[in-house]
Image: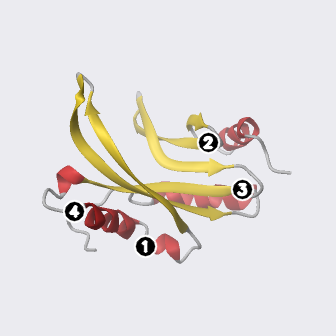
Amino acid sequence: MTPTPSELKKTLVARGFEVYRTLGDHVVLADRVRDNLIMDSGVAAKPGEVLAVRFVVRAQASDFPSAKADDLFERARACAAEALDRGYAEVGTTEVPVRDPGDASTTLDTWYEVAFERAVADEDELESELRYALALEKTASHDRTR
């Protein structure tokens, strides 16, 4: 029997992870940027029929001003290239507009995100894969090639 999101959250905290939030069936881990600032890490544990690890990589349009959407998705995918050898598979893509907090009608940037998932057998493997996913570079940089 797989845990509920609430049970999984308790397990993850007990294993030393910091939880950012629970979104539906995803327990999203936090990335502590500074002592007083945590952010969404882009990594989540997913309960269900099978436990899974999910992470999201992205390319920001402002970093590659002349790039088309397809190229930006490919740049994001390049961040996860080594994860494919570990059994991760692409599960979706999303264009995320980043709105101006002072004027919601203005878009400051657009993130081109690609999500990957991998099933795990038990909580020990879940912990190992979550630590692996947390360590991945999740934002495409200029020095990455397609």
Q: Which residue occupies the extreme bottom position in the image? A: 85
Q: Are marks 3 and 1 in contact (CB under 8 Å)?
A: no
Which residue was labeled with disc 3? Answer: 51
Q: Is residue 22 left or right of residue 30?
A: right
> Is label 3 in a helix, a strand or a loop?
loop
**Kind of residue indicated by mark 1:** Ala
Which residue was labeled with disc 1? Answer: 81
**Kind of residue indicated by mark 3:** Leu
Give the mark nearest the N terminus, 3 or 2.
2
User: Looking at the picture, how far across and down is residue 133, in whole percent?
Assistant: 51, 58
Q: Is residue 134 left or right of residue 127?
A: left
Q: Is residue 57 left or right of residue 54?
A: left
Q: Is residue 53 left or right of residue 37?
A: right
Q: Which mark is residue 68?
A: 4
Q: Are marks 4 and 1 in contact (CB under 8 Å)?
A: no
Give the mark nearest the N terminus, 2 or 4.
2
Question: Image point 67% across, 43% down: which residue?
Answer: 12
Which residue was labeled with disc 2? Answer: 27
Q: Distance of mark 3 from mark 1, alpha carbons?
A: 22 Å
Give the mark nearest the N terminus, 1 or 2.
2
Q: Distance of mark 4 from mark 3, alpha carbons?
A: 35 Å
User: Looking at the picture, how far across and down is residue 95, in whole percent?
Assistant: 35, 50
Give the mark nearest the N terminus, 4 or 1.
4
